[in-house]
Amino acid sequence: MNSLEILYETKHKNMQYFARKISINSKKTIINGVKKAGKTFLIIDYLQNFDDENVLYIDLKDERVENKKIAQNIHKFIKLNPIKILVIENYDFSFELPNVEEIILTCDKKIENYEILTLYPLDFEEFISFDKRHFNIEHLFNIYTNIGSYPQIVLNNSNNIYSAMQELLHVMIKDPIEFLIFKKFSEFQSSKISLFQIYNQLKTSIKISKDNLYKKVKKLESEKMLFLVEKYNSPKANKKLFLIDFALKNALTFKKEFLKRFENMVFLELMKKDYKIYYTDFIDLYIPQKDYGVFCIPFLTEDLIKIKLQKILLHVKELELKKIEIVTIGNEGEFWLKNIKCTILPYWDWALQD
């Protein structure tokens, strides 16, 4: 029995799956995104809609799969069997795709006429659907801030959650130098940094050139492991750094900086809406396309928030903001800053609004 026959006869069932906001709706789909965000689970769940005889699932990174043999035989095999949906994970473009009614690929490149779906770790709404043990929204928020957004960590029953996070990171970042770079970057979560500053700190502990550091940082950016956010209208200014998961810093360092973690949480909710995000000297997160400013102020009262915003009224006017939201922990309210509506919302209400 050849490998394609074995793969064809393999049944694919999700033992445990929870709905994600993203769904497969096209006959030709590419799923990309962050490693370990749940791409395979999303695909396997979708395959439950088909009869087994109509499905062929191939993972080209499966050590048992010989890519050359797949390439040589797949077109003939498809013709000989009633396959209606073909899934190829980690498609490497080493062979031409066969003619199949429906194709799902995971890869990082675009193909004409294929819909691209980008999957990230869980947002807060998805996290709630994953956690079936707790029902109080504030308690769920507290858990979320500590364990983060990766599905396998959320579902992990380990007593040592940081050890589980470290193991997951080593799976996602196999290059030891890249891992050390990511670890160093995590220390600067939600802070303004320059790569030269990071280089000067790293070169005392590891052997790395400036060019090599910049190359590896670009790779981590392309893999969406970290995000470097520009200052508005100042592309050469220091970038503000955010991690793909706000809780990872706690697994890599003993520094406990909740305010930084909180801002990273808010950033990720906005980033998953495909906004182009900037920061300014006075606004934590600024979305010009929406004339929208977001402040991450977890603990201040409404009166103190008003005073803080009144001090930057000129800056707000210069940007012609139409909307300001202040994300807090527990506080809520509403007021006007001249003709700009300012809304104060607890994170759990802000993240769950449409």
Image (tube, rainbow, N blue to C red):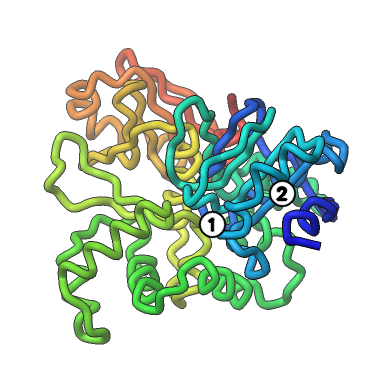
Image: 299 above or below 164: above
Q: Which residue is rendered at x = 80% and y = 40% of the image?
A: 81
Q: Quadrant of residue 311?
A: top left
Q: Quadrant of residue 201?
A: bottom left
231 is higher (above) or lower (below) than 59:
above
Position of the N terminus, as image quadrant, is: bottom right
Which numbered disc covers residue 35?
Answer: 1
| Image position of 284 (left or right of 271) | left
Taking the spot 80% from the left edge, 59% from the top edge, the residue there is: 6
Amino acid at pointer 2? Tyr
Q: Where residue 127 sits in the image (x, y, percent)?
A: 67, 47
Q: Is residue 174 left or right of residue 279?
A: right
Where residue 165 appears, as percent x and y from the top left, is 58, 70
For the question of whether residue 249 can be seen, the reply is yes
Residue type at mark 1 is Lys
Dot 1 falls on a residue whose secondary structure is: loop
Which residue lies at the image location 56% right of the left edge and 40% below the top edge?
Answer: 97
- The residue tagged with tag 2: helix, strand or loop? strand
Q: Nearer the viewer, mark 1 or mark 2?
A: 2
Query: What residue do we see at 79% from left, 55% from top?
Result: 5
